[in-house]
Image (cartoon, helix red, strand yellow):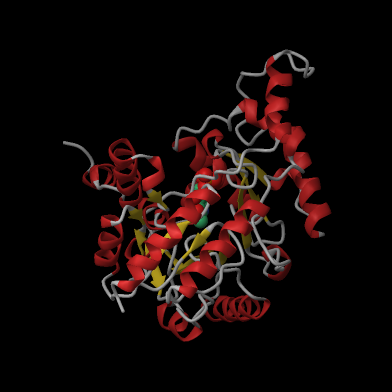
Amino acid sequence: MVSEYMHELGSKKSTIRDIFEYGRKRVAEVGRENVFDFSIGNPNVPCPAKVNETIKKIVSGNFGENIIHGYTPAAGLPRLRVKISEYIEAKFGFKTGAENIFVTSGAAHGLVATIKALAEKGDEFIAFAPFFPEYRCFVEAAGAKFNVVPAKIEDFQIDFDKLEESVTPNLKGVIINSPNNPTGTVYSEDTLKKLTEFLCDKQKKYGHPIYIIADEPYRDIAFDDVDIKYIPKIYDNTIVIYSYSKSLSVPGERIGYIAVSERADKHREIFDAIAGATRISGHVNPPSLFQYVILECMDEKSDISIYKKNRDLLYNALSESGFTCVKPQGAFYLFPQSPESDSRKFCDRAKELDILLVPGDDFGCEGHFRLSYCMETSMIERAIPVFEKLAKQYE
Ligand SMILES: Cc1ncc(COP(=O)(O)O)c(C=O)c1O
């Protein structure tokens, strides 16, 4: 026998992966130029040149390190943790001591460890639809309950009436993700003010801390000078999860960090519990080569002007074709309304034209579909007339 839950997780097909695989098959059949694959969020903008130069420098032995492929401390190289802490202070004007930084294998690892560290029997965690689908299994595998607050589809900010209905005294954590996957929405100052006031009230009422887990892999992919608030400055009980996957276009290298606010209740215990949670997940240390790379490349960013160009192109074209869509201010996703209420059916129709989309149901928000636009601009340009053709089917 095997664990039923793990078996279910491992054997259940991921819609996104399925669509992506289908896309590869179609490319072989009909040619790359005839397939419009908007399914997966794999950054297409190259990593900054300095990243590859640094790798070469490190592996050629010119980096002043004797052992570059060895084990490092579980929480990361001490000087990397110091550098991350200095970076946070310089960028956000918020002090997070190096002892509160845990370097991880990307944001997914940071989320798993943080949720596992916080969760006790009976605890609940909230996410706002639409949400990154992995949240559900991260929470459930930690033995906690996952509660979803339905979407506010007019602008994808937070529906506070629905939040009120979803909250119970067992609430331990609230996962927020801004800029958001799948909508690209950035939470406004007003939303965050209301959310933090709401949580402060509930903490008082229930007599225990409620943590915000700020999942921020898209923090550095934002447009139109939008202001992305640093949550620990406005809410003490915050744990920030950051990743270099998207900002440096290195998702396969698995590197990011957890920053536990030192204003958070029981922050030292939380940090130690995170270390414990990483131990039982088989984490020994974050990838050593990329810890050295980040030491040198922390200030580097991939060229996000390409994403902005793609956003404008696709948003304008879809709007002109009659699709309703909230204009994203960050990340590299669009989340329009499906012209038929069953978005799976709509995505199947799009598939007949070799446009590959992900139904919103997968993100806990029916009646919508997601497009990733971290794709070649030329593919988006070729897809526009095909979207027009698709939209005409609904006139
Ligand atoms: C919202 C969100 N959180 C976390 C992750 C995981 O990112 P990482 O590659 O850093 O593990 C992703 C990846 O797409 C994401 O979209």
Name above or below for residue 326 compared with residue 374: below
Q: Report the side of 223 relative to 391 (left or right).
A: right
Name above or below for residue 52 compared with residue 347: above
Depth check: give the residue in front, 116 or 157: 157
Residue 23 coordinates in the image, percent (x, y): 33, 44
Which quadrant holds the C terminus?
bottom left
Depth check: give the residue in front, 228 or 393: 393
Q: Residue furthest left?
A: 1
Disc tally is: 0
Residue 319 coordinates in the image, percent (x, y): 49, 74
Residue 177 in sight: no
- The residue shown at (28%, 66%) is 346
- The residue shown at (67%, 63%) is 223
> Looking at the rendering, which quadrant does residue 261 occupy?
bottom right
Q: Report the side of 324 relative to 232 (left or right).
A: left
Residue 44 coordinates in the image, percent (x, y): 55, 43
Name above or below for residue 5 compared with residue 261: above
Depth check: give the residue in front, 48 or 197: 48
Q: Report the side of 264 relative to 176 (left or right).
A: right
Residue 99 coordinates in the image, percent (x, y): 72, 44
Q: Report the side of 5 relative to 375 (left or right).
A: left
- The residue shown at (74%, 37%) is 297
- The residue shown at (32%, 52%) is 354
